[in-house]
Image: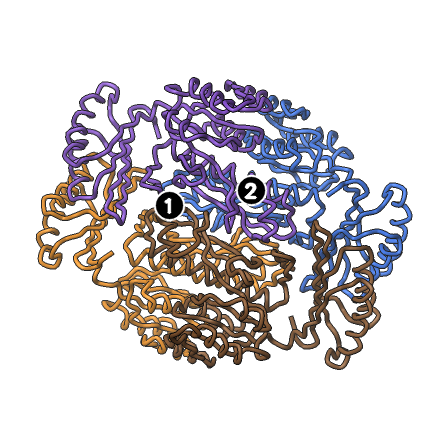
Chain colours: A orange, B purple, C blue, D brown
C-alpha cells in the first residue's frame, strides 16, 4: 500500500441508520476514494468503523475534509480521528532485563515489518544498552533509587522524557508495575505483554506453577495497560502446546517465543489503527 | 440475530470511487438499516461487498428496493444479489460409505448450528440409509450400474432429482468423480472436502504415503468443485499435528476429525452468503 | 494393534539406577516382547514407565508374570499395575442437558475410535434419554429431589449403581457439583471437562464475561475431578481463535466444539492407560 | 540437565524380543544411570531407541562402555552411536540474501537456547556479512562465478571449508540448489527449510500462486536435504492462518515467521540427537 496521501478514519458512535451513507457521502463529494472499510456493531448498540482513504493532496485537503467530517460527526454524536499514514507513530519501549520481546520489536522495525519509529528504549537496568544502540536507537537508563520516594522519582523522570514525545508506550517485559498516576499522565496508550495459561496463574513463578499443574498449553496476552495492570482490554493472544517432558525452564523459553509474536502482532495492529477499545474489550478492524 | 426482515446484499464490481456512498445512499433513503458491512478490494482492482440489512416489511419492500439497487448496479456495472435470510438454502449431501462428514452436517443442522435445510442425501451405496433417515432426512440410493454408460446414467438420475430443487450440493466424502457436464448442469454450487497434507499427496492412499514421508501435520481443504475437481477455489483449511507414533490408520482417523470441522465451517459460511468467488480464489466476508 | 495377548504395564517409583534393566530382564526371561516402552523421570526424582507387552497365552501366563513383577516391584518400592488390553474399561457418562460431549463420546465409541464400553449414562434430567438409547446404551434418570437431603440422596442412588460396576466416570458437562464424599467413594477415577479461557473466568456465565473482555482464544480443559472440582490434574487442553464479531452465544458454540474434542482425547488416553497422575499434574506416556 | 558426564545412545535394529533388556543390562552392570529412554517400533518391524545416560567419569569409561555396547550391537545387528553431550555439534549455516532464518539461529544460539557451535556462515552474496560478524561468527563469501564450471567451482570451495570441520549444514533460505555430489561428499547431514502450503505450490513465486488460489493456511517444512532437494525426510512442519485481506507480500512475511520457528525447532531436535531417519521418514524421540 502506498503511504503518500493515504489516511485512516476511525469512527465510534451509537448504532443508528444512515451512518455509512452520511460518511461515504462526504467522502465521495470530495473525490476521496475508499481503499477499505471495516465496521462492527456491538450487541449493546455501539457502532465502529475504520476506513482507509486515498486523498489526493492530503496535506492541502485535510482542513476542509476535517471540517466536513466534523459536521457529520456532530450530527451522529461521533467520536472520530483521522490519521495520516505517512506519519509513523513514535514509540517508547520499556524493558528491564529480558530482551526477547525488545529484540523482536527492534528487528521487525528495522526490517520494515513494523511501521513505527522507536524513538527510545527506557530501562531500569543498564544491561541491554548495547543491544539497543546497535539498532541506532537511544537507550535511556533510569534506575530505581532507594527510599520511599524512589518509584515516584523514577516515574517522574520517565514522564518528563515521554510526555508529548511519544504516541505509544510498549512494556516489553518491563518488570516494574506502573502506578495509576503514570498511566493517566503519560498521554499515550500503553501496551503490555503478559504470560497467560489455562488456568490462569496469578503471582510469582507462573511457569513453575503451571508445570506443577501439568498444563498442556502455555500462552501470552497483549493488552492495553490500565490502572489494574493485568486487566486491560485484550489485543491479541496465542498459545503453544507443551508436554510433561518439558521443565519449568523450558516452558518459560517456549512462553518467551509466544510473547515475542503476540506482542509484535499487537503493536503492528495498533500502529495500523486497527484496534478500537470498547469498554473492557477491543474491536480489531 | 433475528431472521425476519433481514436480508444480505452481495456486490461485485470494478473498484472505483463512490460505490459505498451510492449503495448506502439508496439504502438510507429507504430507511433500511445496515446491520453489518464488510468489503474487500483486491490488488487487481476488484471490489466486493457483503451487507446485512434490516428492512421493515421486507417482502413488501423488496420489489422497490431491487429496482433502486438495480439502478445503482447499472451505473457501476455491478454483479449483485439479494438474499432473504428467512429462506434457508436447500442442500443435497452426496456420500458413499464414509459417514463422518455427513453425520457432522446432519447433527449440526439438527442442533440449529447450520442454518440450512438438508432436503436429501444421495448415495451410490445403500449403507448409510438408516443413519440418515433417523434425522428425518430422505435418503436416495442411486447406484452405479455396469457398462460404459453407467456413470452417465447415474448422473442423469441425480440431475433429475437436483435441478431446481437445491441451492447447494455438498460432497461429504463422495467417492465418485463428478463429470464436468454434471457440474455445469446441476445449477447450484458444489462444495467438496479434500484431505490435504504438507506436502500434498495426490492420488491413491494419501495417508499411507503421508505416513511414509513422516509428515508432522495432516489437514483438510473445503473448496468449490469445478471441472478440475481438486482445484476449485478454497473456502477453508485446517490441520492437526501428528507424530511418528501414529499409524497410517490413525492418521486417517485424525484426518477425518479435521475434515468434519473444515467442511462444517465451509458450509456454514456458504449458507450465510459469506463466500465470494474471485477467479480461482475466494473472499470470505 | 491386535488386542489378544496384549497387556500394558504401568510403573511408578523413585528414580534410581537399574529399574529399566530389572523390569526388562524379567520380561525377556519369560519371552515377553516389548511392543513399546515410554518412560519419564520428573525433576523431583520420580520415575514413570508405560510398557506395552505381547504375552503369548496371557491369561495362562498372568499369575506367574505378576509374581515375577511383584518381586522386582518390592525391590524398587514400585507402585505398579498390569492391564489386559482385551478387557475394555467400563465407563459411566454423567450428563445434564447439554448433549455435545455425550454425543461425541457415544459416536466415537460406536465407530470403534474409543476402546471403551459405555455401560450407562446417568442424568439428573430426562431430556437426553432417547438420544442415548438410540446407541443401545442404558439411560438412567436420577433426578435431584427437594429438601436438604436431596443431593445426598441423589448421590447415594448414583453410588449404588456405580460401585464395582465401572472403571471410569466421565462428567460430560454434568452441571451438578459432586461432593468430596462421592469422589472418594465411587471407586473409579472421574474425568471432567471444563471451559477455560485466557484469562480464566471463574463463576457464572464465563462466555459472557470472556466476550466482555474481548478474548481472542477460547478453550477447554479435561482433568481428573478431585475434591476441589476445577483443580484436578490436567489431562488435555485446547483452544480455538475467536474475534470480536462473534457473540457470546457463538463463543459458547465454538467452545462446545473444543470441549467435544478435548474430552474425547482425554478419555481415549485414559482408556489406553497413558495418563499417570503425579501430584497435581499428569504424565502422558 | 547438567552436561558433564552425560551421553546419548542411539540404536536402530530389526524389532525382536530382548533388545531393551540386553542394552539396559549392559548399562546397569556398569552403574550407568538411564536419565531418559524413548523408543519406537515401526509397523514394518524396525526398532529405534534414544537413551540419555549419566556416566560417572564418561571420558575414562567410554572405551569400556563402547566395547560392551559393541558386543550387544553385534548380537542384535544394531546400528548405534554414542554422543557426548558436552561436545556441541559444529554447524555451518548457508544463506543467500534472506536473513530471517539465519538471524533466528544466531540469536537463539547466543541466548543459549540452541546447544550448537555455529562455526561459519557461508554465502554466495556478501550482503549479510556484518549482521553475522556482530555475533562473533565468521562469514565466508563464496560467490558463484560465470561460465559452465561456476557451480562446480563454488561447491568445490565450499567442500574444502566444510569437510571434517562441521557436523551439520543448515540451509537457511540458501537459494542455490545443491548438487547430489555435494550432498554425498560433504560428510554431514544437511537440513533445509522449505515454504509449503496447502495445497503445495512447486516452482517459482509460491506465495503469489498461493494468494491466487486463496489459501487459508501457509506453512513451512524443515527436512533433511537429499539428492532430490524438496523430498528428504521431514523433521518439522507448522502453519499459520491467513485471510484474503493479506497480499502476496504479506503472505511471504507471515511465511517467514513460520520458517524461522520451524527451522529453529528442527535444528534444536537434531542437535539433541532426537531425529532418526527411517527410510524417507523420521522418528523424533
Classify the position of the C terminus of chain D by image quarter.
bottom right
Location of residue B2 with respect to C254 vertically, above or below: above
Location of residue D262 with respect to B48 vertically, above or below: below
Q: Is residue A249 left or right of residue B118?
A: right
**Residue at numbered disc 2:** B255
Identify the secondary structure beneath mark 2: helix
Q: Is there any visible trace of residue C176 in the rendered image?
A: no
Outermost residue on the front side: it is D148
What residue do we see at 33% from left, 26% from top?
B85
Question: Where residue A34 sits in the image (x, y, percent)?
Answer: 19, 47
**Residue at numbered disc 1:** D214
Q: Is residue D51 left or right of residue B182?
A: right
Question: Where residue A26 sits in the image (x, y, percent)?
Answer: 12, 44
Gap in Å between the C-alphas at discs 2 and 1? 22 Å
Q: Nearer the viewer, residue C8 or B185?
A: B185
Circle 1 crowding by C-alpha within 10 Å: few under 14, some 14–19, many from 20: many
Amino acid at each position: 500500500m502506498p503511504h503518500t496521501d493515504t489516511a485512516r478514519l476511525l469512527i465510534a458512535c451509537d448504532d443508528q441508520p444512515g451512518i455509512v451513507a452520511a460518511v461515504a457521502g462526504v467522502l465521495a463529494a470530495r473525490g476521496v476514494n475508499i481503499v477499505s472499510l471495516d465496521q462492527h456493531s456491538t450487541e449493546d448498540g455501539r457502532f465502529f468503523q475504520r476506513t482507509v482513504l486515498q486523498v489526493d493532496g492530503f496535506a492541502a485537503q485535510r482542513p476542509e475534509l476535517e471540517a466536513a467530517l466534523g459536521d457529520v460527526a456532530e450530527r451522529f454524536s461521533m467520536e472520530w480521528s483521522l490519521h495520516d499514514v505517512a506519519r509513523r507513530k513514535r514509540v517508547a519501549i520499556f524493558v528491564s532485563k529480558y530482551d526477547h520481546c525488545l529484540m523482536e520489536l527492534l528487528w521487525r522495525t528495522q526490517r520494515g515489518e513494523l511501521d513505527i519509529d522507536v524513538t527510545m528504549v527506557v530501562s531500569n537496568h543498564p544491561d541491554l544498552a548495547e543491544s539497543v544502540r546497535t539498532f541506532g536507537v537511544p537507550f535511556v537508563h533510569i534506575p530505581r533509587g532507594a527510599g520511599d520516594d524512589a518509584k515516584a522519582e523514577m516515574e517522574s523522570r520517565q514522564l518528563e522524557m515521554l510526555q508529548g514525545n511519544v504516541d505509544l508506550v510498549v512494556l516489553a517485559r518491563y518488570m516494574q508495575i506502573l502506578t495509576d498516576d503514570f498511566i493517566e499522565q503519560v498521554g499515550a496508550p500503553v501496551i503490555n505483554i503478559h504470560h497467560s495459561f489455562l488456568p490462569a496463574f496469578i503471582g510469582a513463578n507462573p511457569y513453575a506453577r503451571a508445570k506443577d499443574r501439568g498444563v498442556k498449553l502455555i500462552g501470552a496476552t497483549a493488552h492495553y495497560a490500565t490502572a489494574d495492570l493485568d486487566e486491560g482490554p485484550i489485543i491479541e493472544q496465542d498459545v503453544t502446546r507443551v508436554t510433561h517432558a518439558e521443565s519449568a525452564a523450558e516452558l518459560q523459553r517456549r512462553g518467551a517465543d509466544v510473547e515475542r509474536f503476540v506482542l509484535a502482532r499487537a503493536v503492528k495492529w495498533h500502529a495500523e489503527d486497527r484496534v478500537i477499545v470498547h469498554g473492557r474489550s477491543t474491536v480489531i478492524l
